[in-house]
Image (spheres, grey):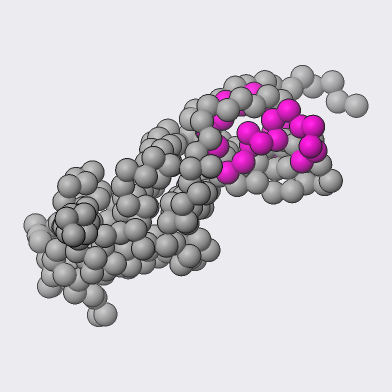
Amino acid sequence: MSTTPKSLYRDEGIVLRTQKLGEADRIVTVLTRRTGKVRAVAKGVRRTKSKFGARLEPFSHVDLQLYTGRTLDIVSQAESIRSYGPAIVGDYPAYTAGTAVLETADRLTAEEKEPSLRMFLLVVGALRTLSERTRPAGLVLDAFLLRAMSVAGWEPALGDCARCGVEGPHRHFSVPAGGSVCRECRPTGSAMPNPVTIEHLEALLSGDWETAEASERAQCREGSGLVAALLQWHLERGLRSLPLVDRSDVAPRREVDLLREA
């Protein structure tokens, strides 16, 4: 029997996913504020009398006390800070977008216990906005994906050329090159998106929601495709949740205003 004392620590985090372990336990993956991504065993949480089983569900913002284990840490206490789940699950576009947010955060934080405060704050902000339904879920997701790629070091070039850095705007866009490219640098097979689509992506990346929400549906759709292609290129394999995202709530503000006036 080991006499090595266990290290106890406390942190807050967002539950990204859960896995069943044995008959009553569960492995929870949590993106924490200070520690980074943590995988820990929550013992007995699948029993009906569990003290904190319901608090350790995806979309939950929790305060945790954990013991450091050999391979997986152990959750000893869990207190709910805010559960975004009920509001997000009750709206299908928000749910599908939120699921993609959690999977993206999990994939982009590949190294466990590598602090990533900016990614944590991005996830909290995205889930809060989705739960409050103050923005179209599809736009919230695209904004999150662009900013998450930026945090990971893969911010797409939307103005200057991704290869030579010459000042833009440029008409060509190459996913392998990392974004907009000039005529001299464009590789074979480069796309030519609508210039307004690139402006839409710049607005999402910078947080200019007035411009982003005023974009036409065609530009929103084209922008979503470019964002998804960039992310999957960097991850080298696709996200399972991304093709399932429901973007039916993405309607330009002008259309919404006309519907209200009708």
Q: Is residue 11 visible?
A: yes
Q: Is residue 73 magenta?
A: yes
Indicate whether 179 appears above or below 107.
below
Residue 221 falls in which quadrant of the image? bottom left
Q: Is residue 257 left or right of residue 132?
A: left
For the point 74% across and 22% down, the residue is: 6
What percent of the width, then of the height, locates residue 150? Answer: 32, 48
Residue 224 falls in which quadrant of the image? bottom left
What percent of the width, then of the height, locates residue 214? Answer: 17, 55
What percent of the width, then of the height, locates residue 153? Answer: 35, 48
Q: How many marks?
A: 0
Q: Is residue 116 left or right of residue 53?
A: left
Q: Is residue 82 left or right of residue 262?
A: right
Quadrant of the frame with the C terminus: bottom left
Furthest toward the right, the residue is 1
Front position in the image: 168 or 258:
258
Q: Is residue 215 visible?
A: no
Indicate whether 1 appears above or below 20.
above
Front position in the image: 48 or 177:
48
For the point 57% across and 40% down, the residue is: 15
What percent of the width, then of the height, locates residue 45? Answer: 75, 36
For the point 25% across and 49% down, the residue is: 205
Front position in the image: 48 or 162:
48
Quadrant of the frame with the N terminus: top right
Indicate whether 219 appears above or below 100.
below
Furthest toward the front, the residue is 262
Question: Which residues are drawn in magenta?
Answer: 46-75
Q: Is residue 85 magenta?
A: no
Front position in the image: 146 or 160:
146
Residue 51 falls in which quadrant of the image? top right
